Amino acid sequence: MSSETKQILTTDGIPLEVSLKKAERKNKIKAFLLVAPLLFFLIITYVFPIGDMLFRSVDDKMVTQMLPKTFKAMENWDGQDLPDEEVFAAFHEDFIKLVEDKREGKLSTQLNYTKNGFKSIIKKLRRASKKFEEGNYKEQIMAVHKRWADVEYWRAIQRRAPEFTGQKYLKGMDMYVNEEGKIVSVEEDRRIHRVLWLRTLEIAFFVTVFCFLMAYPIAHLLATLPMKYSNLLMICVLLPFWTSLLVRTASWMILLQQQGIVNDFFVGIGLVADDNRPEMMYNKTGSYVAMTQILLPFMVLPLYSVMKTISPSLMRAGKSLGGTPFVAFWKVYFPLTIPGIGAGCLLVFILAIGYYITPALVGGASGTLISNQIAFHMKSTLDWSFASAMGLMLLSGVLVIYWLYNKIVGIDNIKLG
Amino acid sequence: MALPKYTEPHYRIWHYIYLTICAAVFFFLIAPLFVIFPLSFNAEEFLSFSDGMKRLDPDAFSLRWYKDMIYGTKNPWGLAAKNSFIIAIFATIGSVILGTVAALGLSSRHMPYKGLIMAVLISPMIVPLIISGVAIFFFMAKAGLAATHTGIVLAHIILGTPFVVITVTATLSGFDHSVTRAAASLGSDPVNTFMKITLPLILPGVISGGLFAFVTSFDEVVVVLFLAGLENTTIPIQMWTGLREQLSPTILAVATCLIILSTLILVTAELLRRRSERLRGINR
């Protein structure tokens, strides 16, 4: 026998190592092919469109394409004094083309976003431009309105030259780029979005806390009761879980209305006067109450599945070693439930932060969240790029939480009922 | 949960406080659903209990709103129910097929980039619905599928597959792969093995995933609000419009029917879960 170990061969004469690798690769491809249909379906219909949102949110080509010659001519302009005849002539040429296509209205809307006051002067320019003579456009345009002779307005046009802009994101945080090109906040009383972001965080946070405080005792009860009782009580958790969101919201609308049952009850026990019934709906209270009840099962189920695995003898051991029931609970039981708490809290928080339907119905003006604002811009103002920008800001927040969730609990550990 | 005899009084008191808290939370969870039930039989147009109802006067109750739901003039519920069922059934079929096949691949230990792919596959469940709604709307508008049944079905397949993937992967985690190897060694081809061996064993997981997908589609309103035209109206859309404009008892009649439906689904899901646990030999 030779001292060298011989390479092991399969019956085909191929080295075993090579053959094994080939088989593994085949298995890999097989597994991937099974996943492929869903993966590609989701990439095309879901992942790309989210990327499309990113593109839309920074897209600012509209003005760039409306005034191509103007921006070309502006490249040589230092932005200090009024631009020279070359820029005015180019602007005139672009403008005539827009008037021919009847698109000058769009231009005025767009420019008005950058600086107020463009609407009227573009209207005036359209009327005047019909009588323009060839040559010396600078004089002629400046004669239309004194703002056309104001360098600020030409700087505002120049700011729209880039094809991409981050201004929708700034708007989402109530900031904008001022005339000097600095990023500043809007006036105090117009900061609607910051209020909404803070309120969304606040409501999501407190709903999570309320859910946790309510879910912990009942999950514990469900996990420690004998099977035949706990199964029955589990229905109380699962029935709302399976019931339509709108049905549950409707029931809260009935309960919380001014002539509703909750108010009747308060009047009945003498807590409030009959003629002074509190408004419990169409404000934050409505959002809090309804969202807590609707999201509660999402907290109970992960807590329950973790508590179910904790052996009751651990508590007994804690007590037999001299701990009072409270010490045994706090030092032994509670730490063991932390994975469940993490899962439940993050799940509820993620769901609450993106809530739309319930706040829209019972939240009124003071109980709506950022999602409602996104829907408003999608459906009413049709400012889709702004809706996309806010959606992505929300999404990045959720992804951070999702990442934390993965770190703490692991994404494979999601349990559904 | 009886307390042992030697329990000290203040722990005894604490125990009863704990039970009271639990009872209150259970009441908070379930009671709102039961308010809808009697009110949907209200003979009057109000959404609170009339004096007659409090006295249990038979005249105060009627089936008026159920009749209105079924026969009412310019009745939107018939069309909405038809659309909802059609969309939900097709979305469920699509989700179950795509999701189950993907779960089979994901459960294979040879699957490359498992974590990343899993994250993509279940992302529609994690991303807030409003963002999914915006993204899916952009896609459907480009593809010319906005305001069509096909578009809504595709959208609901996107939202429903994560549930199928998760439930089927969970079922497969307790799956003994030697049975498929046994089948293969006895000469069965992979498709035959899947139909005869694997599928019957993972069926509870597949069906409960399908139930999740069905409920997701049947109850979905955010994405449909962006996508649906007048002809694609669904039950959730009608309820949403109704709740925004004016709360009529007809909505409560519809809601009662939906609660009955969800009870049926809950019972099915529970029976399946128990069967699946029995099959996997988990005894708790």
Image (cartoon, rainbow, N blue to C red):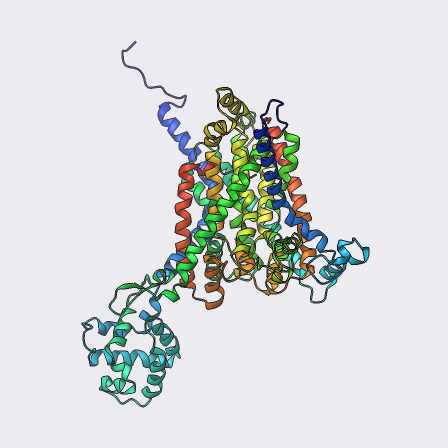
Viewer-proximal residue among A267 and B93: A267
The quarter holding residue B236 reads: bottom right
Name the quarter where the N terminus of chain B is drawn: top right
Q: Eyeballing the image, is A299 above or below A155?
A: above
Residue A14 visible (yes or no): no
Give left or right: position of A171 versus B107. Answer: left
- With respect to residue B98, does A9 lie above or below? above
**Quick one: quadrant of the C terminus of chain B?**
top right
- Residue A199: image location, x then y, percent: 44, 55
Closer-to-camera residue (B267/A299): A299
Q: In this view, does B86 lie to the left or right of A198?
A: right
Which corner quadrant of the image does residue A93 belong to?
bottom left
- Residue A340 in percent (x, y) is at 49, 36
Q: Which residue is drawn at 66% across and 60% down?
A: B79
Residue A221 visible? The answer is yes
Residue A305: percent from left, percent from top: 54, 34
Residue A372 position within the rendered picture, expressed as x and y whole percent measured from the top left: 49, 59
Quarter of image, res A250:
bottom right
Q: In this view, does B200 lie above or below A128?
A: above
Seen in the picture, residue B98 relative to B171 is either above or below; the reply is below
